Amino acid sequence: MQIPGKHLRRLLFLWGWVLGLMGIAGCAYKVAPGGGPEDKSPPEVVFSFPQPDSTGVQDLSTIELRFNEAVNPASFLDQVWIIPRIEEGFTLQWKGGKRLRIHLLEPLKEDQTYVLILGTGVQDLRGNGLKEPFVLAFSTGSRIDRGIIRGRVYGRRARNAFIFAYPDWWGPDSLPFFSRQAPYFTQPGEKGNFELRYLKHSSYLVVAVEDQDGDGKYSPMRDRIGFPPFRVVVDSVRPAAPPIYFYFIREDTLAPRMLRVDTLHRRLLKLIFSKSIVLEKNAGARIIDSLSGKPLSLRYMDRNPQQSRELLLYTDPQQARIYRAEVWGVQDSLGRRVEGDTVFFRFRGSVQGDTTTPRILKRVPRDGEQQVPYRTSIQLLFNLPVDTFSLRQAFRLLDEDSVPVAGTWDCSSWLVPRFHPEKQLKKNTRYTIRLDLHALRTIFGRAFGDSLQVGSFRTWDWADLGEIEGTLDMPDSLMPYPVWIEVHPLNRESVLDQVMAREGRFFIPFLPDGRYRLRVFVDRNRNRRLDLGGSRPFRFAEPFFWVPDTIQVRKRWTTQGIEVRWR
C-alpha cells in the first residue's frame, strides 16, 4: 500500500485522538461489564462502491468500503492492494470506525479490469482478522476478465505468504519474480487455499512466496518460495486452470565450499565443507607428494554418514611432509558443484598411528525389534570402511528354521552397506543376523573382533495388518512418468510406505490398523521422491496432490474401491 507520510501521520494522530476521548469517557462513566461470550468473529465488508463486478466504471477517484463493526486502522498498513498496481498509489481516509475511503492518486486505465484486495492482516478492535482476503472486482470497460487460478499451499502456515502470477510467460528464459512485482497476486487463506480471479487470458508463471520484506519480489536465502509443477494457461477453452499445489522451500543458492582439512591420523583426512554434500558417481581424488611428485594411494573416499558436511579420505600411510591434493565430484543435494568443479588444497601428512578399534555402530533393524515390515533391508553402520568381500563371507540372515535368506548387497557405501532379501520376509517370523567378527575385516585388513555377534528381530503378524486397493485417474499429459502413492499416518508428514500405480490401479499391503492420508506425485526424474523445484537453474516442481479424504485401515481387511482423481 502506498500512503504518503503526512497522510499516515494524520491518520495515526486522529485515531489516537479518538482513543483518547474514549479513554476519558471511560473514566467519567461507570458501566457494568459486558456479558456474553468473547467476540471472535472476523470483520466483514457489508457495502462497497463500486459494487462488485461493476462494468463501465468511469472517472472513479474514490473507492468506499463499509464494515459491520469497527476495525483497527493500523492493521490496514500493507494490507490494501489494487491490481493492476497504480503507480502513484492511493491514500486512506476514515469516516468513523466502520467506513473507509480509498482515494486514487491517478486516473484508471480504459477498458481494464481492476481488483481491490484486503489482506488477511486486516483486524477488528479485538484482533480478529479476515479469514480470507476480501476481493472487489470492477471494470472500466464493458466486460470483466473471468480467468481463475486456484490451488493450495501445504505445510505450516507462513507469515506474509503470497501467490504471485506473471502473465505472458512462456518459459524459464525469463524469471520475473527476481526483479519485478507481479501484476496479479493474492494471499492463501488459513488452510493454505487460494484463488486468483479476474485474470486475463494468458500463459502464467505462478509462484508462492513468503515475502519477508514486503517488496513484492523473491529474495533467495531470505524468502521461502514454492515452485509450480507447470506453466498455467488460462484461455477461452479453460478459463479456470487446473488446481496448482505448492510447498514452501528455502533455497540455499550458495555452492558448497571447503572450509578446512584435518589430518586425523596417518591414514585418514577429513575435509569439512560449508554445507551438506553428496558425491557424484565419478567423484574422486588425487594426492601427490609435493617434494618427490609421487602419488599417495587413495584407498577409499566417502561422505561421513554421521556428519553430512564431512568428506573422509582413507589413504596409504602418510609421511611428515607436504602433500598437494585435489577432489572432484562434490556437490550439494540440489546439484550445485563446488566452485570450479574441483577442490585444490595442501596438507601436512601425519605420522600418528591409527588406534581406532573397528566397530559396528548401528544395525537396522535393531536387536530385538518387533513388527518389522516384510520388505525391510538390513543396514549396517561401520566406523571404518569394511572390506566388502569379507562382509559377504561373515554375514548371514537366517529364518526360524536356520535356513539362510538369499539376497543381494548394496555396497555403494563401504561405511553403510545394505543387504536386500531376494524375497519379502515371512509373516510373524523371528529372523537371526549372524556376523563372524573374526572374518569381518576393514579395508586395511583389521578384524572387527574375535567372536560371533548374534541378533534377532521379528516381522509383523498378518493378523494385525490390513491393505488398501484403489484406482487412479490421471491426465494423459502425466501418463509417461511413474506415479507414486505415498501412505502417511494421520497428522504426520512421515511416509510409512509408497507404491507405484500401474495401469491406473494401486495396491498397498501390510498396513497397521489406523487412519491414513495418501499423497500422489509424478516422478518426472524417476528418483522415487517428490522434488520441489528450484530457481537457478529453474526447475518445475514435480506435480503432487493430497487425496482429500482419510482412509480407515482395519486388521485382516482390504479397504477397496478407493477412487483417486488427479485434481
Image: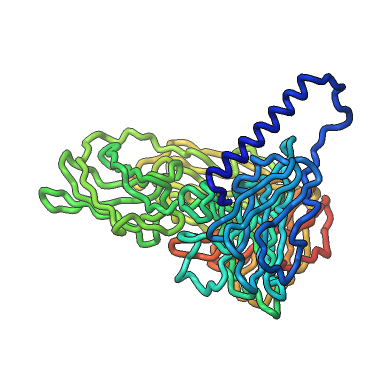
Using the image, determine if residue 534 lies above or below residue 452.
below
Using the image, determine if residue 495 lies above or below residue 368.
below
Which residue is found at the position 49% from the left and 64% from the top? 176
461 relative position to 212: left or right: right
Using the image, determine if residue 153 lies above or below residue 472.
above
Pick the quarter of the image with the C terminus. bottom right
Q: Nearer the viewer, residue 309 or 410?
A: 309
Which quadrant holds residue 165? bottom right
Q: Position of residue 203 (x, y in %)?
A: 59, 74
Q: Nearer the viewer, residue 520 or 159?
A: 159
Q: Nearer the viewer, residue 269 or 17?
A: 17
Q: Nearer the viewer, residue 273 or 294?
A: 273
Coloring applied to the structure: rainbow
Q: Position of residue 315 (x, y in %)?
A: 28, 47
Which residue is found at the position 60% from the left and 64% from the top? 107
Q: Position of residue 299 (x, y in %)?
A: 30, 51
- Residue 241 seen in the current view: no
Q: Position of residue 30 (x, y in %)?
A: 83, 19
Judged from this view, the residue extending furthest toward the right is 36
448 relative position to 238: left or right: left
Which residue is found at the position 29% from the left and 58% from the top? 340
